[in-house]
Image (cartoon, grey):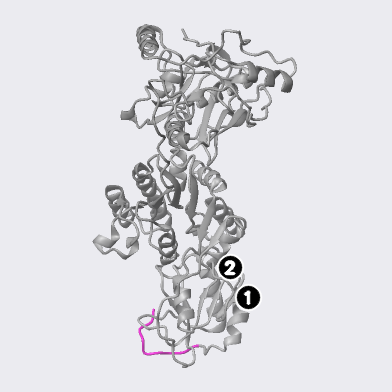
Amino acid sequence: MAIRFRKGLDAQAEFARRSRPGLKLDREPTTSDRWQQPSRMSSTLFAAKVMVLRTRRGLKNLGFGPKRHQKIVDGGFQTIIAQSQTALRTDTTSGETLLQTGKIENLRIACRALDGTVIPAGEEFSMWRQLGAPRSSRGYVLGRMLQQGCMIPAIGGGLCQLSNALYDVALQAHCRIIERHAHSKIVPGSSAAFGRDATIAWNYVDLRFSPPHDIQLYARLTRDRLIIRLLRHANDLTNSAPVSQPRTEPFPAPSGPRNCHSCGESSCFRHSPSAASPPRERRAFLVDEHWPEFQKYVDSLARFDDVLGVPINGAWLRLRRYAWSMAECNNVRSASIAGVMRAVSVRGAASSGSARRATEIAGSGRIANSLARLLTPGIEIVTVAQSYLPYLHRGGALGGREVSVLMSRLPMSVLHARLDKAFADHPDRASLADFRAPAWLMALETEALAGAAHIVTPHAEIAAMFPDRAVLLPWRRPETSPAGARPGRYIVFPGPTAARKGAFAVRMAAMELGLDVLPLGSELEGPDFWAPVRVMKQVGWEDAAAVVQPSLVEDQPRALLLAMARGIPVMATSACGLPMQDGLTIIPPDDPRALIVELKKLAVPSNFRASAPCA
């Protein structure tokens, strides 16, 4: 049973009639629909009625209540049959900013609970049964709630925007509506003027519906919008309703609900003398492996009250890989347990690159889930490492926030497509197909990257994929002394020895030209890969004729940067991420003929025999 308070709807009704001829409203306004100032007595009576109704509903649910449905990560539900998009921020007055922030946090928590829920055909879905109680112990905060004709602060406030959207998509998908209650007032920007709203109140005012076929809920927040979709299984060929256009237009509501910050009713017992000023937008930096380029970028943005989240406190433990520092920030937190678990697991993984990569991806998910706790409601801007991005996106932690991504590698979709093509061209090179990330993880990363405000990277090829959003950082060259003017005697291959790094092209060029090779990385293609090429060991770079890397993919070209700093010629592909500059020759990936042509230009002495040990 719903308690409905008859309030003024005249302006909204008139607007609805003009803009939607023939539209039938949920109800017609009456002459008694006028706002009345709430009193302590009326509020006490309201609370008593609520207690009675909650008790009645609770007792009824004990025996005949709907069940809680399961969530499925990758169940094949891909066809969109209904969708709704609504703005997250509709009231920009200073007094309402904090409550809007709280509302968005409540929506994050609720969407996290709903996203992926599968509702079988004919079964009843209850919003409150699926969400549970909106208590502060479960992370819910003060948001905006409509009560007695006023917008007031309340724990879990703002969830009506979610119930509105769920009701809208349920109607689009021809679900059977079991329980639905209209709002007593129209909120600016909402669907209430058109009878597409559904108010809720724990746990006596619920939204319940039953779908005609199996569906899955999609509930996500972008920077500015709440997106709700109903999905059907990809192989379900039964008839379905077409998806209608999402309702996103702001509806004028000149007599909409009053709020405690701007109503001007100083005699009301809820009146606050002054509204708190909204705080400065705080930032969080959730980083992974330390790159000097990313360190400089973070330093340029961080302030004292911002948050730095690291997997391991490398500065304290003196681990160079995680040696992040933030002179301007006094709030550094780590995911120590998850970070150590990932480091130990990767070290103990099999020597193959695929095993190590799979272990590292799983460990990054645990670290991301641990660092997500740092994203408190006051965090409006997030800079996040690419390795954490899909997990934080799936958990809803990034919704309603401006997101910048520290990109350290190609997007998984691009990486997989590139390796798949190379393997199709060279099916004998098994390492090209040794690892692929799960499809659901790749889809999450693609979706999260599409919604990111900025793509931050020093990698030129990656930046070129996002021309409108990329922040291209300069690579940091190491400080070193230039090499001498002695003639080059061999070529350096940074490695590791793998097909994706161009090892086959280097071996073929070395065999044809009679060159010696100094490989720097691990041997991933077998111990006899370089035979009959002579492999140099325990020698420096001073006599190198060139550093060569015809890679298909390369994340950190540190060896190439060191070579150019020493004045040694570099031959690399655009996949190495270096911009055009002196000392760099761009060659096609995995193309031995093009590499041979460029090496001949250097006149490298062949068949050189040194006293250094050779393989």
How far across and how far down the image is residue 176, in percent?
57, 13
Disc 2 packing (10 Å; few <14; some 14–19; many ≥20): many
How far across and how far down the image is residue 116, in percent?
48, 30
How far across and how far down the image is residue 173, in percent?
62, 21
What is the total number of numbered labels drawn onto the structure image? 2
Q: Which residues are magenta?
A: 607-615
Whether 587 is drawn above or below 347: the answer is below
Please identify the dominant SS of the magenta region.
Answer: loop
Residue 593 bears which disc, if any? Answer: 1
Where's the C terminus, which quadrant?
bottom left
Q: SS of the residue at dot 2? A: helix
Residue at position x 37%, y 50% from top?
A: 359
Whether 147 is drawn above or below 2: the answer is below
Q: SS of the residue at dot 1? A: helix
How far across and how far down the image is residue 597, in percent?
63, 80
Please name the residue that numbered disc 2 is placed on: 574
Residue at position x 38%, y 82% from top?
A: 614
Report the residue that reaches farthest toward the bottom. Answer: 486
Report the amino acid beneath label 1: Arg
Asked whether residue 428 appears in the rendered view, the answer is no
